[in-house]
Amino acid sequence: MSEPRLPQEFADLEPFAETWCLATEPERYAQRLASTVQQMQEFYDAITPRAEAVIAYCDGFPLDDLPEPVQRLLYLLYSMVNVSFPVEVWSQPWVPDSGTTSLDCVLEPIP
C-alpha cells in the first residue's frame, strides 16, 4: 500500500488524490478535459460536502509554508473549483459552444 497523500483527517478523499491533486491550473484543466462527466461527478460529490472542512483545516497552516499533505489537499480543492461548472451547469468537460477556442492561464493562485 502506498503512503497517504492527504492528511489523515481527509483519508476519505484519498481515492481522488492521484488524479486530482495537481499543482497547476493547466494540469487541472487537462485532467478535466480527459475525464468523463461521471468521473468528475464522483469526485465533486465526494469533496463538495468536505470543502468547508478542507478550507478550515488549511487555514490552520501558514500559506507560505504548507506541509506537503496540506498543499495537496489545497490542490484537491482547486480541482473541485475546476470541475464545478462542468458538473453543475454544462454536463460536459469542455465549455459549450466554444469551438477550438482555448484559454491559457498565465497567473494562478500559489499558496
Image (spheres, rainbow, N blue to C red):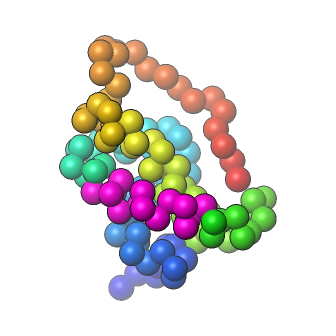
Q: Look at the image and say whether residue 46 sits in the magenta stretch.
A: yes
- Residue 91 visible in rendering: yes
Residue drawn at x 69%, y 47% is: 110
Residue 38 is situated, as x and y percent measured from the top left of the image, at 21, 49
Q: Does residue 50 appear to the left or right of 43 in the view shown?
A: right
Q: Is residue 96 above or below residue 19?
A: above
Residue 89 is situated, as x and y percent measured from the top left of the image, at 32, 33
Q: Is residue 95 above or below residue 17?
A: above
Residue drawn at x 46%, y 82% is: 3
Residue 91 is situated, as x and y percent measured from the top left of the image, at 25, 35
Instruction: Look at the magenta stretch and give its main secondary structure.
Output: helix
Q: Does residue 94 appear to the left or right of 62 in the view shown?
A: left
Which quarter of the figure has residue 71? Answer: bottom right
Q: Is residue 99 above or below residue 80?
A: above
How many badges with numbers are in the image?
0
From this viewpoint, which residue is outermost toward the bottom? 1
**Which quadrant is the N terminus positioned in?**
bottom left
Residue 84 is situated, as x and y percent measured from the top left of the image, at 40, 42
Residue drawn at x 44%, y 50% is: 80
Toward the viewer: 55 or 8? 55
Q: Look at the image and say whether residue 67 sits in the magenta stretch.
A: no
Residue segment shown in magenta: 42-55
Toward the viewer: 40 or 33? 40
- Residue 27 visible in rendering: no
Which quarter of the figure has residue 48? Answer: bottom left
